[in-house]
Structure formats: C-alpha cells, structure tokens
Amino acid sequence: MKCESKIKKRILFVDDERKVLDGLQRMLRSMRSEWEMESAISGQEALEILEGKPFDAVVTDMRMPGMDGRQLLEQVKNLHPQVVRIILSGYTDKDLILNSVGLTHQFLSKPCDPEALKTTIARACAMRLLLEDESLISVISKIES
C-alpha cells in the first residue's frame, strides 16, 4: 500500500508494554482521520498482523523479549520491503543503533515528542512515495556516493 494523502496511512506500533502502546494511541489520537493505527505486543504478533493486511509503516521498540526490534525489522525488510521501518526506543546504546543501520529508516528516542513522531512518520511515508517515481529512481541509482 502506498503512502498517499487521500488514503489513510496504516501504521503498526510494536512494544511489549501494553501501557506504552495505550499511551501512543492516546498521544496520536489527533491523527485518527489520517492514520489507521494498530498495535502488537510482540514481534511475532506484528509479523502475523503484517501477513493479514498491508501497512505503510512499522514503529517498534528495540528491547522486547523473544524477538527484539532489530530481528523484527529484519523480517519486515525481507518480507515487506515497501514498509517504512522506524525504531522508537528508550535505549540509546550506540552499538544497538549501529546494528540497526540498514534495517531502519529512522531511530527515535523515548520519550518522543508527539509532533516529532507524527512528522517523522509522515516524512518517511512521503519519501517512500517519492521513491516509487521511476524517473527519480533512475537518477538516484546513478549517484555513486
């Protein structure tokens, strides 16, 4: 599914703490007219949800039991490469961030300002839409560095 302004964006939030997911829903309530938001309490549940319907973006915590955020984003990248991948984590370990390069489009720290989160998701989806333009892809593919 493309990120288009006329169609609601579908955003999947993943965190092992239900209170965090509930807080995100409350914090982003003003986006209900533009976003269809769902949540998953684990990486495995997120993958099951992604199999059932298309999403524009996945916003995940990094540290979760079982499948962590990095492992989830690796699966999302392989199975659903068109989905924008964002990490929203309270852990700012430099090695953790460096290990996520290539898997994530954006890394945000908790607590995150609601406007920053909204802007980041909107910008990432808009960029993804631009990258579907064949002429732009042609130009970008010729850049060497």
Image (tube, rainbow, N blue to C red):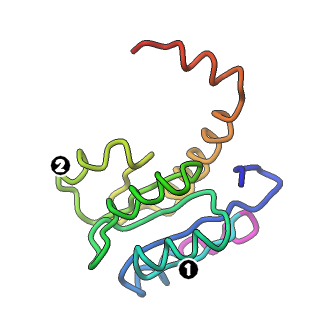
Numbered range of the magenta stretch: 26-34
- Residue 78 placement, left or right of 97: right
The foreground one among 3 and 48 is 48
How far apart are the two marked residues, 2 and 1, measured between alpha carbons? 30 Å
The residue positioned 38% from the left and 48% from the top of the image is: 103
The residue carrying mark 1 is 26
Check the image and report above or below for 144 versus 119. Answer: above
Q: Do the residues labelled 2 and 1 touch (CB within 8 Å)?
A: no
- Residue 68 placement, left or right of 93: right
The amino acid type, in three-letter code, at marker 2 is Lys
Is 21 a magenta residue?
no
Q: Position of residue 78 (x, y in %)?
A: 47, 52
Classify mark 2: helix, strand or loop.
helix
The residue positioned 53% from the left and 78% from the top of the image is: 39
The residue positioned 36% from the left and 81% from the top of the image is: 16
Q: Where is residue 131 in the image (x, y as percent from the top left)?
A: 63, 33
The residue positioned 57% from the left and 58% from the top of the image is: 57
| Mark found first going from the N terminus, 2 or 1 | 1
Classify mark 1: helix, strand or loop.
helix
Q: How many marks?
A: 2
The residue carrying mark 2 is 94
The image quadrant of residue 52 is bottom right
Q: Using a 10 Å C-alpha cutoff, classify the residue at mark 2 as few (fewer than 14 neighbours), some (14 to 19) or many (20 or more).
A: few
Q: In which quarter of the image is the N terminus?
A: bottom right
The foreground one among 28 and 5 is 5
